[in-house]
Image (spheres, helix red, strand yellow):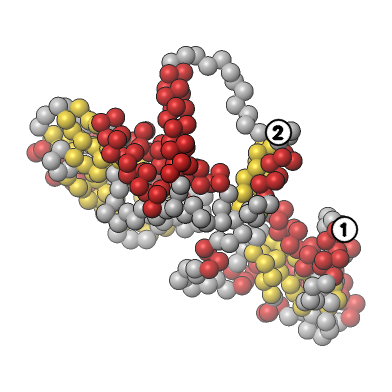
Amino acid sequence: MNEFLIAIRFVLNSSFFIFNGIIYQQTFGTPMGSPLSPIVADIVMQDVENRALSSLFFKPSFYIRYVDDISCAIPLESLDHMLVAFNNIHPRLQFTFEVGKENKLDFLDVSLILIDNHLIFDWYHKPTFSGRYLNYFSQHPVCQKRGTALGLIDRVILLSHPKFHIKNISLATKILLDNNYPVDFVFNVFHERIKTLIHRNKSSIIPNNNNNSDSGSFFTIPYIPNFSEKFNNVTRPLDVRISYQSLNKLNKIIKVHKDPLPGSSQSNVVYKINCRDCDASYVGQTGRQLSTRVKEHKNHIVRNNPSRSVITEHRLSYGHDFDWESVEVLDHEPFYHKRLISEMLYIKRQKNSLNLQTDTEGLHYSYCNAVSNLSKI
């Protein structure tokens, strides 16, 4: 087989480029926060590879792409032709390639190994692999630690050829032991999972007439050791599955070295607008940029809308002005219903609130005593 295994890597030369008359900004690599970025990237890559492959004078024995990483087998003398075909699509879209050595190519989480004109796979780790996983003594529920062990054994069984299973099971076991997992826990999880995978493999050839794929709803609660697990007994009769959310997250401890956004450019926030001439204030929430919502408040006063807001009413009744340049961001919350609860709690904490009584109707009375003991804002 006079062919080479190669991996083609994508390199974007600029954060801006024009493709098919459309301007793209950092479509590839790390998305800029837009949920459309991965979709647009995949559409562009599909167009690129269709054009490149159609210009080849040969057909690769196999061709696999994941996002912008490509693995394929091509004739030895066609390496340069393959690279030129991809790099001629657009000057700002450039690719590099890596040639497999000794009939072996590392691609994503697997090593592709060519033996007797057949490909087999092995579990691959990058040279920077540290072996650090969720520690068994960390403050996380047992189900998440069990999930860590399940993920490792799944990679061993599903990503590697049987001839590598003993080696990889030993590696997975060592990784878990190094992260303080008990031996009995590791072996029990591995044993049950291997039996499940074998049974699933056998049952896959039998037609499945069970169309009931509804696994119920999830109910998320904060995880508190030796307390949160008790909710399992409460929800057991219900069609609800519990998931746990950690209270101590690394992103609250380790700060990302990025320039913080100014308050007016932030979104998903609870905010407070103060009166310049008295202690009155207004608390609101918005999922859009704060500057957009503040502009709406200001325009509502200028236009003297017949359906007056509480801010407009205060401005016109007392002649007071608001401190539009120093709007406070009280909380960040991406989930709408949680943001509403946060808004109601901050409304209750105001010294002299302009908010309507109806703004806190959704707050359960059991919170009122606790909120009343908090400092005023």
Residue drawn 21% across the image and 48% down it: 97
SS for dot 2: loop
> Which quadrant of the figure has residue 52?
top left
Residue drawn 73% across the image and 34% down it: 238
Q: Relative to 192, is 224 on the left or the right?
A: right
Disc 1 residue type (three-letter): Tyr
Give whichever of discs 2 and 1 has the lower sequence position. Answer: 2
In-front residue for pair 143/23: 143
Disc 2 residue type (three-letter): Asp
Q: Please say if 336 is above or below 102.
A: below
Question: Where residue 126 appears, x then y in whole percent?
Answer: 29, 51
On the image, numbered disc 2 is attached to which residue? Answer: 239
Residue drawn 47% across the image and 58% down it: 32
Q: Relative to 255, is 51 on the left or the right?
A: left
On the image, numbered disc 1 is attached to which residue? Answer: 365
Q: Please say if 361 is above or below 278.
A: above
> Which quadrant of the figure has residue 320?
bottom right
**Marks 2 and 1: CB-CB under 8 Å?**
no
Q: Please say if 137 is above or below 328.
A: above
